[in-house]
Amino acid sequence: MNALPLVFADPDQILFYRQQGGDTRAITAQQFMADAEALAGDLTTGPGAHQFIINLCQDRYRFLVGFAATILAGKTNLLPSTFTGETLRQIFIDTPDALCLHDHDDWPFPYPHLSLAHFSLAHFSLAHHSLDHLSLANRCYREPSPDDLVESGQIKPEHVVAQVFTSGSTGLPMPHNKTWGKLVRNVEAALQQLALWSPVSLVGTVPPQHMFGFESLVLLCLIGRCPLWSGKPFYPADIVAALDAMPEPRMLVTTPFHLQALLDAQIALPKIDRLLLATAPLSPELAERAERVTGAPLFEIYGSTETGQIATRRPTQSTAWTLFAGITLTKAHPEENDELFIANGEHIEAPVMLSDRIHLRADGRFDLLGRVADQVNMAGKRSSLNYLTAQIKAIDGVTDGVFFLPEPKKNQARKNRGGKDQVITRLCAIVVAPGLSAADILAALRDRLDPVFLPRPLILVESLPYNATGKLPQIALQAILDQHLAALASKDQPSWRITADHPVFAGHFPGHPLVPGALLLDWVVERVAAHWQVSSAALRIEQAKFAHPVLPDARVTLDLQAEADRCRFTLKVHTGETNPVAVSGVLSRQKNDEASDAKAKRA
C-alpha cells in the first residue's frame, strides 16, 4: 500500500476551534501542520533518544500537535487512558527511554518531560534547559530539517503510530499497537457505518488518549476532516458553551455518565445533530430521553482497545449491533455453547477474543449478553456484576452504586477437598445513598438477591470514582476498599477485658474463677451480628472449640473471617507473653423463618 496522508483535509479547511480569552479562534489544516512539523523537528534533534512519546495533553489541539509531531518524527505515541503516577511508573518500567508530553503547569513526577502549557500558534523551537525538563515558554524559531521528518506528511501504512492502553476497568492497563494504515481503514469504515457523508463539528467529553476519544475525536478530525473543539468540556455548562461555539452540524461525542449529567442539569441546549456514545452500558430510558430532549439521533459504538470500533446500533430502534463491513465474528470454541467469539478482519490488527459473551443472529447482527469477566460464581450459584449493580441501583434512595470483585488476597486461600488452595473472594458494593444506612440497603437487597450475592462489605461514599471516560477502573474501586479496610484495621481490634469484679465469677467458680464459655460465645455472637448488621437471634453456632481458659482481668481479642452466610471466628486471650487461642468456631446466619422461631423461643 502506498503512503497515506496524515491530514486528509484541504490546507485551507478549518480543522480546530480554540478558546483564546473571550474569543474563539479557528485554525486551518495548514496552520496545524506547521505547528506539528516545527515540534517534530525538535523531537528529532533534541537531546536524548526518546523513541516513545507519552502524550498526556488534555487540550485537544495540543494533543493533536504532539500526536502528529511524534508521527512526523518517526516515533510512536503512547496513549494511557488514565494519568496517574502508578500508570507512568508501569510505562517507564517497560519503556525507560520515553518522554512525557503534557500541558500542565506543574510536573510532580520524576520522569523526562516536555511541557506545552504555554504553547501558542506559529512555528517554534524548544529552548532545551535540561534533559529532564523542556519548556516551550521560551522558544526561538528554527526551520526543521526535512530529512528528519516523514516526507510531506505522508505516513507508511505499517508505521506504528500509537500504542493505546486499555482502560484498566478490569485490571492493569495494557498497550496495543495501532498502525496508520489500519487506523485509516477504521475511520473510513466508521464514516460509512454512521453515514457521515460530510464533515460535522465535533465536541467531545472523552479524553483523546482513550480508544473511543482517539477514534471518534482525533481520527475523525485528521482522517474524516471533521472540525474539533480543542477544549476539555466536562460540566454541563462547559459542554453547552463548546457546542454553541461550533458551527452546525454538530455531533456530541460523550459517555452515558456525561450525558446523564447534561440532561439532569435542565439547561437550554444548542442544536445537536447527532449523539455518539460508548465506554459504558447505556440504558434504554436514557437513550430515549436524550433523543427526546435533543431531537438528535443517538448512536452507540461497540468495540475495545484491542479491536477498535467494530459495530454500531441506534438503541431506540434496535438492541442488536451491526458489524462494520469486513469484520467477522467466529466462535472461539465451535464444539461448545459458551457464547465466546473471535473478531477479525479489516482494521483489526490481529484476531481478538472478545471480552463479551455474544448471541449471533442469523442476519449477522449480534446481541451482547454481558462481559466474560462480569460473570460471578458464588457457592455454586451464578450471576453477573451488571445484574447485581442494576439491583442495587433500583433501590429507592440509592442514587448510584456498583458491585465488584476485589483482588484476591493470599491469606484468603483455603484448602478445598482436594487439598489445593482455593481463593475465596467476597463481593463488594460501593454505594451512593444519602439518607440510607448500610443496614437499610442490605435489607432491601435481601428481598432482591440470593444471600450468597450480598456484598461484604457494603461501603457508603459521596460519589463513585468515575474516570474521564465515565468508567469505574478496578484499581480505583480497589483503592476505596483498601482504604475502608485500613480504616477498620486502624481501629482497635474487637476486644474485651473481663474484670475481676464481673458478677459471673461469683458462681463460676468460687475459689477458682474462670470466664464461662457461654459468656465468651455471647460476646462473639454480638460482635458477628454487628458486623453483619443483623439481629443476634438470626445467628446459629455451628462449631465452637475451647482450647485455653480465660481468667479474670484477661483481655480477649476477636478475629472474624466472614464469608457468604458463614463466619469463622478466633478468640485469643492476651496473657502478656503469648496470645493463645481461647475459642474458635463457625457461626452461620439462619433463614428468616428459622430466625423467627429462635427469637420466639428466646422470648
Image (cartoon, rainbow, N blue to C red):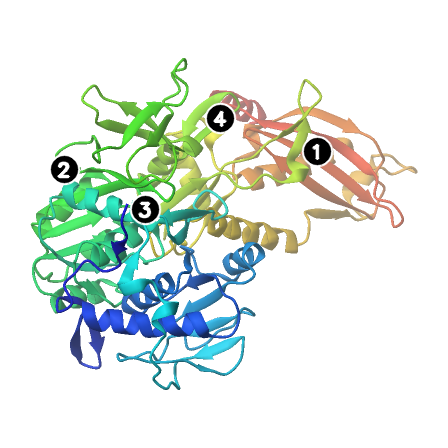
Task: Look at label 2 and name its amino acid.
Answer: Thr
Which residue lies at the image location 89% right of the left edge and 48% below the top edge? 577
Residue placed at 20% from the left, 30% from the top? 320
Tell me the distance, in whole angstroms, between the alpha carbons under discs 4 and 1.
32 Å
Q: Which dot marks residue 521?
A: 1
Kind of residue at badge 4: Asn
First in residue order: circle 3 vs circle 4: 4
Height in image: 181 above or below 121?
A: above
Is the C terminus in the top left, top right, bottom left or bottom right quadrant?
Answer: top right
In the image, taking residue 185 as reference, residue 83 lies left or right, namely right
Q: In this view, does 170 lie to the left or right of 151?
A: right
> In this view of the protein, can residue 241 be seen by the observer?
yes
Residue 449 % position (x, y)? 40, 29
Which disc, if any, is residue 377?
A: 4
Q: Earlier in the sequence, mark 3 or mark 2?
A: 2
Along the line of sight, which residue is nearer the eye, 119 or 418?
A: 119
Precedes in sequence: disc 4 or disc 1: 4
Which residue does the numbered mark 2 point to in the structure image? 316
Residue bearing the label numbered 3:
397
Residue in front for this viewpoint, 505 or 157: 157
Disc 2, SS: loop
- Looking at the image, is mark 3 or mark 1 earlier in the sequence? 3
